[in-house]
Image (tube, rainbow, N blue to C red):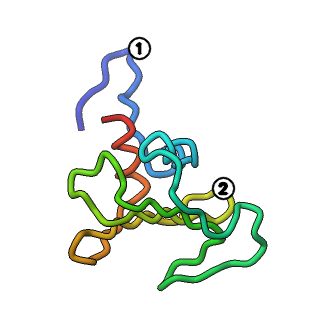
Amino acid sequence: MAAIAPGAAPAATKTTAERRPLRRNDVVRLFGTPDETLGSVNEPRTMHEGKLAYNEKWVYNRPRRELSRPRARYIYWQRYDFVASERVERDGSRVRESEAELLARLQG
């Protein structure tokens, strides 16, 4: 372990708990407004798709600014909380992207 000079604070490291959550406005900054919205932030019923539970799904058909040029992108929300992001590639395969990956794209 490296010594810390007197009076110096240790370097701050961000843990998962310290990272800010992905917000709805962040997703709009990345991908624009969705082409289609299923459910609503105020929807009391929870929907299920695979292992995901959500009350709102944003659909982007042929999303812009995507290097792989996917067929679609789905963003799942439970009220205001991010649940998951999936890209549907041209071959039909689905690729999950984590909240951390999307936040990193905002900064990059």
Can you tell which mark lies on residue 80? 2
Q: Nearer the viewer, residue 89 or 52?
A: 89
Seen in the image, is 55 located left or right of residue 61? Answer: right
Count the labels in the image: 2
Can you tell which mark lies on residue 101? none
Residue depicted at 36% across the width and 35% down the height: 107
Q: Quadrant of the N terminus?
A: top left
Residue 101 lies, in percent from the top left, at 35, 52
Q: CA distance from mark 1 to mark 2?
A: 42 Å
Seen in the image, is 2 located left or right of residue 60? Answer: left
Residue 42 lies, in percent from the top left, at 77, 63
Residue 74 lies, in percent from the top left, at 45, 65
Pick whichever of labels 1 and 2 is earlier in the sequence: 1
Above or below 63: residue 106: above
Residue depicted at 52% across the width and 54% down the height: 34
Above or below 65: residue 60: below
Q: Secondary structure at mark 1?
A: loop
Name the residue tied to disc 1: 7
Q: Nearer the viewer, residue 81 or 6?
A: 81
Marks 1,2: beta carbons within 8 A: no
Label 2 crowd bin: few (<14), some (14–19), many (20+), radius 10 Å: some
Residue 47 lies, in percent from the top left, at 63, 80
Give the residue at the far top of this rendering: 7
Above or below 40: residue 5: above
Question: Within the image, what quadrant is residue 39 found in?
Answer: bottom right
Question: Within the image, what quadrant is residue 96 found in?
Answer: bottom left
